């Protein structure tokens, strides 16, 4: 094709690109912008002159997970390297105003003298924000559902305890059934109940322990701390709690709660 005809074709294509509602840019062999339509200028928040001057090269670009995207992962770089079209590479553009514009970038190599890559950029910021809002709503729903399930389990446990107390007068039987009901209702791997006599907690019943600690001075352990403070305690990481005393290996977390003269604990 004659140079004049090529230039005319390029002018016609640019005129068409200007009418499109998606961002269009054309890069040369060094991936410099030689053309950008108005839609891309709006998405990038940078003038056409700024784009052609390469100001966007100093910006940060993000992967979908928010980590930095290296240059070799850009859609344009992939298209040039593979010499084929790539589609919808999700890319976050950190603009100079601090706002992140999320885009889906497609790129295709072309074989013209000054055009080497054509980029099509869709602004998916609103779509991504809607997805994040939906995900947050789903997470809140799951949290509410889990809380409702836990309240139902607590209600079931209270019903079981009431039945035990109504039918049993023997303290040892009451303790055994309460411990087993707690383990069964909440799925705790280990549950134990101690009675306070003097300054020592004495084990009354347990489930899940292969070895036990029969007596705990109230000056020691998480259970002793709970007795002294008269407040329940949740230890999410027992290895980070200096007071924790384990009867067996493998315990990750522990919850202990005082109840009148008794202290119950359960662990995972």
Image (cartoon, rainbow, N blue to C red):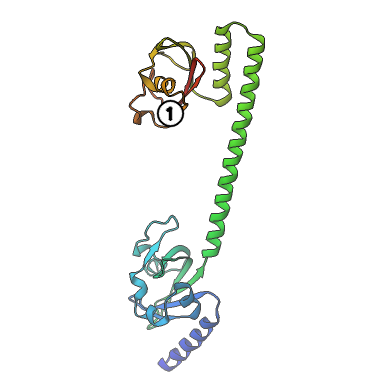
Q: Nearer the viewer, residue 11 or 45?
A: 45
Q: At 52% from the left edge and 82% from the top edge, which residue is drawn?
A: 18
Q: At 41% from the left edge and 28% from the top edge, which residue is drawn?
A: 252
Is residue 52 positioned above or below 102 on the image? below
Count of marks placed on residues: 1
Task: Determine whether the residue tagged by mark 1 lies in a helix, strand or loop.
Answer: loop
Q: Position of residue 255 (x, y in %)?
A: 46, 26
- The quarter of the image holding the N terminus is bottom left
Q: At 59% from the left edge and 36% from the top edge, which residue is drawn?
A: 147
Place residue 181 in its image quadrant: top right
Mark 1 sits on what residue?
253
Q: Is residue 27 visible?
A: yes
Is residue 46 positioned above or below 177 on the image? below
Q: At 39% from the left edge and 56% from the top edge, which residue is drawn?
A: 67
Q: Position of residue 167 (x, y in %)?
A: 66, 10
Place residue 156 in its image quadrant: top right
Place residue 157 in its image quadrant: top right
Indicate left or right for 173 with 52 as reference.
Answer: right
Q: Residues within 10 Å of mark 1 (few under 14, many from 20)?
A: some
Is residue 2 positioned above or below 89 on the image? below
Is residue 235 positioned above or below 28 on the image? above
Q: Position of residue 16 (x, y in %)?
A: 53, 83
Q: Position of residue 121 (x, y in %)?
A: 48, 71
Query: Farthest residue toward the bottom?
Result: 4
Q: Is residue 24 visible?
A: no
């Amino acid at each position: 094709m004659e140079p004049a005809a090529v230039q005319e074709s390029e002018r016609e294509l640019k005129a068409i690109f200007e009418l499109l509602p998606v961002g269009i840019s054309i890069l040369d062999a060094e991936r410099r912008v030689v053309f950008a339509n108005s839609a891309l200028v709006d998405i990038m928040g940078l003038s056409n002159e700024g784009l052609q001057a390469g100001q966007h090269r100093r910006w940060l670009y993000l992967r979908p997970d928010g980590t930095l995207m290296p240059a070799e992962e850009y859609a344009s770089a992939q298209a040039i390297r593979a010499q084929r079209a790539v589609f919808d590479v999700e890319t976050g553009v950190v603009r100079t105003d601090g706002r992140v514009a999320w885009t889906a970038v497609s790129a295709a190599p072309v074989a013209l003298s000054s055009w080497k890559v054509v980029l099509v950029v869709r602004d998916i910021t609103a779509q991504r924000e809607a997805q994040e809002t939906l995900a947050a709503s789903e997470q809140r729903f799951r949290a509410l559902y889990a809380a409702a399930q836990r309240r139902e389990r607590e209600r079931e446990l209270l019903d079981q305890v009431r039945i035990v107390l109504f039918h049993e007068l023997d303290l040892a039987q009451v303790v055994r059934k309460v411990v087993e009901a707690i383990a069964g209702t909440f799925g705790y791997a280990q549950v134990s109940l101690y009675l306070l006599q003097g300054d020592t907690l004495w084990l009354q019943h347990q489930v899940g322990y292969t070895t036990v600690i029969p007596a705990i001075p109230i000056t020691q352990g998480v259970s002793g701390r709970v007795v002294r403070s008269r407040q329940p305690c949740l230890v999410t990481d027992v290895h980070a709690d200096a007071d924790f005393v384990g009867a067996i290996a493998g315990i990750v977390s522990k919850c202990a709660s005082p109840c009148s003269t008794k202290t119950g604990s359960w662990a995972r």
